C-alpha cells in the first residue's frame, strides 16, 4: 500500500494464499492524509470488518513546521505570528494567550480596558471557532445548508478582526501589553451589528440541527467517552465538558479579568458527538453574553480612559511612530524592540488560556537572553486526538468522519 | 482551595525524604525534582494519594541543558489537581548518554503521544512505552532536532551560494 497516497485506497486481498493459511477477514482503508472529509491533513489507517471499524491508527505531523525550534531564535514579539498558525480557526485566542504568557513573565500589568477589549476579541474568536466546528459536524452528517448559512456571520467576525488588526485569518493581533492601536468606532459599530444579528442566526442554526431526527440519529451515541477516560486522555475544552467535567480555564485560573464576568459552563453527560455539539452551541450563547457584558464595561470608560489601549511597558511595546522620528528615547526603544535586543528576564512560566478546543498552554523558559531558551506549546487537540481509535472502535465508517469533525481537530495546532 | 503548595511539599517530603528536592515556586507554581529512577513512584503517589489527587497530566515535555554535566536533559511534567485547582511542575533530569526514563503511559493514556513527541525531539528513551517511534518528524530522521547542538541557521551567513534564493 502506498503510504503517502492522496486517495482512499481500498486494498482487497485477492492474493492466492498457501494451503492451510487463514484468510484475513478485515479490510485496510487508508483515510487521508488529504481527503475532503477529514478537514485537514490527517491520515488514518482503518482496519474494517465490513463497515465496522476494528482499529484506527492515526499518523500526524504532515504539516509540522518546527515552531518550538523557530521560537528559540526569535524575540518575543516575533513569536506571535507563530501562534497564529496553531489553531487558525481562532488565532486571536492564541495571540492573546501568548501575550498574556509574556506579560506574566515580564510582570507587565495591563489596564482593565485592555483586558475587556481582549475578552471581546477572544470570545468572538471562540464563537467563530465553535461555529466552524459545529457546522462542519452538520456537513459530515449531510447538512450543508447550516455550514453555508453561518459562513456569512463568521464573515462579520472577520470584519471586526480586520478593523482591529488589519488581517483576517492569521491575525497577529495585539502586542505585549495591549493592542497596536485603539479600537475604532467602525470596529464598535461592526461589533454592535454582530451582537444584534447573531442571536437570531444561532437560533435558526440550532433549529436546523439540535432536534433534527436525522442529525440526532447520526450523532447520539457516536464516539462517546466517559469522564474518567476523557480525563485520563488529557481532554480539555468542550470535549471534556461534553463528558460531564466542568473544567474551564477561564474559571479555574482566570486571566485577562475573566473573574469580573458571570457565565455558566455548559456540560454534557455522555461525551458523544451530540453532546459535544450541544456544549459548543451553549458556549456560543455564553460567549455572546460575555461579549455584551464586556462591551458594556468598555463603554463605561469615559474621557481620557477611552484612549487606553495598552500598558506602559516601553521595553516591549513599540512607541508611536511620530515619536520615533522626533524623540531620542522613543527611537532607541523602537530600535531595540524591532531588532530584538531587549533582554528577557530569566524565569520559567506556564500560562494557559481556554482556546477554541481546549486548554492552550505556553511553557516558556528564559535564561536571560534575548530569545526564549525553550518554548513549548501545550496543544489541546494533539493530546486528545490519541483517543480517536478508542472513540471509533466498533463504530461505522461514516461515524469515523463525524467523530473526527466533532473533536474539532486542527492540523495546524496538532503538528505545531 | 484547601490544598496549598506547603501541604504538597510537606506530604512529598514526608513520603520521599531527600529523594524529592529543589523545591521552588516560580510564579506561584510549585516545582520540584527527583532522581529519574523515582519518576513513576512520585507520579503514582501524586495520582493515588487521597489528599493530593493529581490524576490529570497537563503537559509533558523536555528541555536540553548542554552545560549541566550528567543532567543534560530534563523531562518536565505539569500536573493538575482539578478538584482543588492547583498545578505542580515535576522534573527529572537524565544523562544525555543514557536518556532512559520510565514511561508514564500506564498512569495516563495522554502520555502516549506526548512521550513520543519528547522522544522525537529530544531522544528521551521511555522504557516500557508501547509504541515509541517518531511522531511529528519523518521516520528516517537520525538526530533529535530540539537538542541545542542543532542551532537554527544564522541568517546573516554569507558562505552559502544559493542562486535560487539569492543568499
Image (spheres, rainbow, N blue to C red):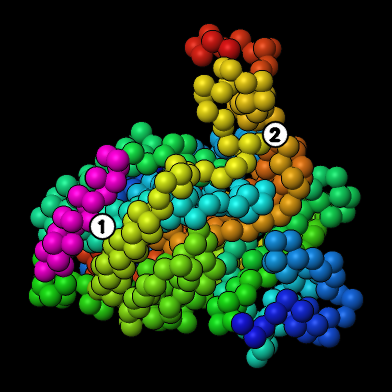
Percent across and percent down for residue A116 are: 43, 55
Crowdedness of circle 1 by 10 Å Cα count: few (<14), some, many (20+)?
A: many
Q: Look at the image and give the residue range highlighted in magenta.
A: A185-207
Q: Residue at x 68, y 42 (%)?
A: A372
- In the rendered structure, the answer to whether residue B158 lies left or right of residue A139 reads right
Determine the CA span between mark 1 and mark 2: 40 Å
- In the rendered structure, the answer to whether residue B145 lies left or right of residue B113 reads right
- From this view, report whether residue A182 is shown above or below residue A246: above
Return the disc, 1 or 2, that comes first in the chain's sequence.
Answer: 1
- From this view, report whether residue A265 is shown above or below residue B71: below
Percent across and percent down for residue B151 are: 70, 33
Is A188 within the magenta?
yes
Element on which disc 2 rests: loop
Give residue A131's mark: 1
Q: Residue at x 37, y 41 (%)?
A: A183
Is A92 within the magenta?
no
Residue marked by disc 2 = A342
The nearer-to-camera label among 1 and 2 is 2
Q: Quadrant of residue A390?
A: bottom left
Percent across and percent down for residue A258 are: 46, 64
Amino acid at each position: 500500500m502506498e503510504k503517502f497516497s492522496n486517495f482512499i485506497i481500498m486494498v482487497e486481498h485477492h492474493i492466492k494464499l498457501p494451503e492451510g493459511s487463514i484468510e484475513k477477514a478485515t479490510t485496510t482503508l487508508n483515510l487521508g492524509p488529504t481527503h475532503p472529509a477529514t478537514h485537514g491533513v490527517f491520515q488514518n489507517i482503518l482496519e474494517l470488518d465490513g463497515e465496522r471499524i476494528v482499529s484506527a491508527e492515526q499518523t500526524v505531523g504532515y504539516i509540522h513546521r518546527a515552531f518550538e525550534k523557530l521560537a528559540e531564535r526569535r524575540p518575543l514579539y516575533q513569536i506571535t505570528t507563530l501562534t497564529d498558525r496553531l489553531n487558525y480557526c481562532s488565532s486571536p485566542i492564541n495571540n492573546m494567550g501568548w501575550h498574556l504568557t509574556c506579560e506574566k513573565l515580564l510582570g507587565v500589568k495591563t489596564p482593565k480596558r485592555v483586558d475587556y477589549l481582549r475578552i471581546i476579541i477572544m470570545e468572538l474568536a471562540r464563537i467563530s471557532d465553535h461555529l466552524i466546528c459545529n457546522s462542519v459536524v452538520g456537513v459530515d452528517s449531510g447538512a450543508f445548508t447550516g455550514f453555508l448559512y453561518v459562513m456569512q456571520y463568521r464573515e462579520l467576525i472577520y470584519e471586526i478582526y480586520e478593523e482591529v488588526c488589519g488581517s483576517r485569518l492569521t491575525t497577529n493581533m495585539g502586542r505585549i501589553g495591549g493592542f497596536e492601536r485603539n479600537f475604532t468606532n467602525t470596529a464598535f459599530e461592526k461589533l454592535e451589528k454582530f451582537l444584534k444579528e447573531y442571536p437570531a442566526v444561532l437560533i435558526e442554526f440550532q433549529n436546523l440541527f439540535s432536534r433534527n431526527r436525522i442529525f440526532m440519529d447520526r450523532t447520539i451515541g457516536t464516539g462517546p467517552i466517559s469522564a474518567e477516560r476523557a480525563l485520563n486522555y488529557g481532554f480539555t475544552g468542550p470535549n471534556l465538558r461534553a463528558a460531564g467535567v466542568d473544567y474551564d480555564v477561564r474559571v479555574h485560573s482566570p486571566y485577562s479579568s475573566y473573574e469580573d464576568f458571570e457565565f455558566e459552563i455548559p456540560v454534557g453527560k455522555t461525551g458523544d458527538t451530540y453532546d459535544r455539539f450541544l456544549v459548543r452551541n451553549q458556549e456560543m450563547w455564553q460567549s455572546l453574553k460575555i461579549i455584551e457584558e464586556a462591551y458594556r464595561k468598555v463603554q463605561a470608560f469615559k474621557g481620557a480612559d477611552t484612549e487606553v489601549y495598552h500598558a506602559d511597558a516601553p521595553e516591549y511595546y513599540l512607541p508611536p511612530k511620530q515619536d520615533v522620528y522626533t524623540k531620542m528615547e522613543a527611537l532607541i526603544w523602537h530600535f531595540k524592540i524591532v531588532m530584538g535586543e531587549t533582554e528577557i528576564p530569566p524565569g520559567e512560566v506556564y500560562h494557559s488560556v481556554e482556546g477554541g478546543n481546549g486548554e492552550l498552554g505556553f511553557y516558556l523558559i528564559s535564561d536571560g537572553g534575548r530569545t526564549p531558551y525553550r518554548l513549548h506549546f501545550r496543544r489541546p487537540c494533539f493530546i486528545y486526538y490519541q483517543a480517536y481509535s478508542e472513540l471509533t472502535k466498533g463504530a461505522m465508517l461514516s461515524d469515523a468522519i463525524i467523530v473526527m469533525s466533532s473533536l474539532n481537530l486542527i492540523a495546524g495546532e496538532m503538528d505545531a | 482551595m484547601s490544598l496549598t503548595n506547603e501541604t504538597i511539599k510537606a506530604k512529598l517530603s514526608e513520603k520521599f525524604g531527600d529523594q524529592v528536592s529543589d523545591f521552588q515556586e516560580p510564579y506561584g507554581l510549585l516545582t520540584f525534582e527527583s532522581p529519574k529512577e523515582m519518576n513513576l513512584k512520585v507520579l503514582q503517589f501524586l495520582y493515588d494519594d487521597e489528599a493530593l489527587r493529581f490524576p490529570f497530566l497537563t503537559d509533558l515535555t523536555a528541555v536540553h541543558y548542554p552545560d549541566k554535566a550528567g543532567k543534560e536533559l530534563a523531562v518536565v511534567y505539569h500536573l493538575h489537581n482539578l478538584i482543588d485547582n492547583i498545578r505542580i511542575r515535576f522534573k527529572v533530569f537524565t544523562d544525555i548518554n543514557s536518556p532512559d526514563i520510565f514511561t508514564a503511559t500506564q498512569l495516563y493514556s495522554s502520555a502516549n503521544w506526548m512521550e513520543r513527541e519528547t522522544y522525537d525531539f529530544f531522544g528521551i528513551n521511555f522504557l516500557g512505552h508501547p509504541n515509541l517511534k517518531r511522531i511529528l518528524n519523518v521516520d528516517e530522521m537520525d538526530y533529535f532536532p530540539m537538542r541545542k547542538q542543532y542551532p537554527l541557521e544564522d541568517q546573516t551567513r554569507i558562505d552559502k551560494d544559493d542562486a535560487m534564493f539569492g543568499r
